[in-house]
Structure formats: structure tokens, C-alpha cells
Image: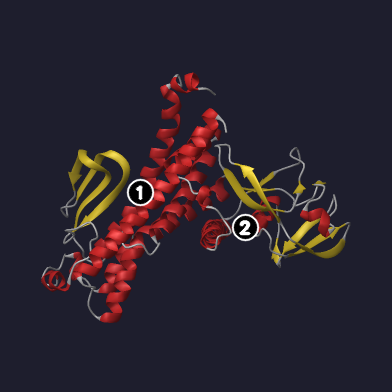
Amino acid sequence: MNLTDVLHLPLSTGVFYALPFLLALTVIVFIHELGHFLVARWCGVDVEAFSIGFGREIFGWNDRKGTRWKVAWIPLGGYVRFRGDANAASLPDAETMERAKADPGNFHGKPVWQRAAVVAAGPIANFILAIAIFTLAFMLVGRPVVEPRVDEVLPGSAAEQAGIRKGDVIVSIDGAAIDDFTELQQAVMTRAGEPLAVALDRNGERINLKVVPALSEEPDNFGGKFRKGLLGVKRDPMGPIRYERLGPVDAFETGVERTWFIVHSTFKYLGKLFTGRESADQLGGPISMAKAAGDAASVGFSQYVAVIAFLSVSIGLLNLFPIPMLDGGHLVYYAVEAVRGRPLGEAAQEWGFRIGFSLVIMLMLVGTWNDLVRVATVMFGG
């Protein structure tokens, strides 16, 4: 693709990616803020505003308890404003807290455990949304099941070196049962370079092997690279796939497992990132998220809602990071307050907010830079 092609890309291309992404983001933000809102109401906190989007209000209404529900022009997030929220950090000094105690509906006058519950409710709501989506999908559509049978062993691969053969059926990895090929991929994805105990069935005979997955770098269809552990086995792409509908209990358990897998994989990546075993070039920004949402929407509704579930877990997890301007940072401050018996000083809170703001901006810049590099690679090559 050359520069002329880029300049003549139709507007509909951008809209195709932007609209599914904005819709997904709106749903995720609404559920996140609804978590804050419901627990705040339960704790007796007066909620002054519930906004989807930022900036000037497009339309809105007041409910019977005085909360202003509104939709704003900039659809890139949202917020809930409680009585007593006067600054961006929503963290008062001791003097403000003493005055707030005389106001029953003031957020900062509530006990520290109630304020912590209100703050934690947002990320928890994101996890609940993901679990609900996965549960419904497994009940209504079913869980795709592909027998973990090895139809091809790649030459020189970790599987070949360990003695895995064509026709073997993987039974378990490190003691965890493997029921389908997707579980096999997930089990080794974040385990590159680690020895795994693999149990397999070979013509009715149980065989135990040690396999060390190789590190694989594959293009992510957007100019970047995706790193993962690889055994070096393949299944027949034309092989049978069956969808197994699950009952409510099994669907819920599988939904929890799928959500936990996303959380666990994220922590695995971050751990390797901080120890220098992974590169930050896998971090994505809004362009990557928009592309993922648009691509999923083009495939089908079930794939689209699965992306919403994945993004919901990611956003919930991000908000729990101990960065002062995020929910996790607030929880750290509340923990300190519970130990000290009083909040941190205003100067300490202000410095914490500035550092947190800088970290968030840095993450956004790194993700956006990676997106732009991938776009430039796709458009101009190199």
C-alpha cells in the first residue's frame, strides 16, 4: 500500500472500526460506573452525576434521588460524581473528612471500608460482565470442542524433540486435564522455555514426557508481533468441531475459568516484561482495540461480544493497578488510611496523583506509539 492508497481510503473504513469499538467501550464503561453507583447507593452516598462520555452534555435527566444521568459528546469513557468529590483524585485531607462526617451523603464522610467497597465495585463489575458474557455464550452457543489430537508434528519442534508423534492425544499438561485443542494452546502460550509434564495417549497406552515449548514470534496482522510458547504440533483444520452446550453451573464455571485465564495471562506477560524477558512492543493502544472490535464484529455477533468480554477484563484489571489516579491507587490510599487512622497529607496525595497521571500517560503513549508503528509498517512496509 502506498501513500496514494492511504490518502484515498474511504471514510467507511474508519467508521467500520470506530463504531464497534465505541459501542463496546460504552457498554464496558457503563457497567464499570454502574458498579460504583450501585454500591455507593447501598452505602448511602449521594450520587450527583452519572455520565457516559466527557465534555458537554448531549442529553440527560434527573432521577428521583437527584442524580443527573447524562450522555456527553466525547464517547471515550465516563464517570460517576459523588457528593464531596472536589478534585480529580477524589482524595481529601483530614480537615475535609471532618467536615464531611457531618453530611450523611458525603462520600468522604463514610467509613474507609465503605469507600473502598465503592471504589472496588467498578473493576469487579467489569469481571462480572465478562463472566456473564462467557456464561451466556457457553449456554446458548456452546463451547467449541476439538479433540487435542496431534495431526502433524513440525520438524525440529519442541514436540518432535520430546518424542510426540502424529496421532497422539494430549491428555494433560502439568497435571491439568486437556479436553480440547484450544486448552492445549492456552496451556503452553505463556510457558515458553519452561519444562512441562505432558501426559498423552498413544493407541491406548499412557505415556509421560517432558516438553519445553519454544518461543514463537508471529505477526498479529497489524504489523506487530505476538510472542507465545509453541509445542510445534498441528491439528487438521478440516477436522470435526463440535459445540457443546453447557448447563448453567458448568457454563458459569467455564466463564470464570476463561476470565481468570485472561487475568493470569496478563500477569504472566507483565511479570516477564518487568524482568526483561518480554518487550513492551506488544502493548496496544486505542487503534489496536478498535481494530480488534471491528474485526470481531465483521466475523459475527458471538465473536464481537467475546471481544467485549476480553476488553472488560482488561479494563477492570488495569483499573486495579496501584496507580494513584486509578481505582487501585485509591484502594492503596485507603489501606494506608486504615493503618494510620487518618488519610495521607494533601502534599503526599498530590504527588501521588501526579506520578500516577504520568504513568497512565506513559502507558497510553507507549500503546499509541506501538499502534502507529504497526500502521506505518502495514501502509509503507519495512
Asked which quadrant contains residue 41, the reply is bottom left
Mark drawn on residue 29: 1
Q: Position of residue 51 (x, y in %)?
A: 25, 47
Q: Amino acid at mark 1?
A: Val
Q: Position of residue 360 (x, y in %)?
A: 36, 54
Q: Amino acid at mark 2?
A: Thr
Asked which quadrant contains residue 72, the reply is top left
Q: Position of residue 91 (x, y in %)?
A: 22, 65
At x 70%, y 51%, the residue is 181
Q: Quadrant of the N terminus?
A: top right
Pointer 2 residue:
190
- Closest to the observer, 364 or 236: 364
Q: Quadrant of the C terminus?
A: top right
Identify the mark nearer the N-term, 2 or 1: 1
- Alpha carbons under labels 2 and 1: distance apart: 29 Å
Dot 1: few (<14), some (14–19), or many (≥20) neighbours within 10 Å?
many
At x 14%, y 72%, the residue is 101
Q: Looking at the picture, does residue 250 appear above or below residue 281?
A: below
Q: Residue furthest front?
A: 382
Which secondary structure, mark 1? helix
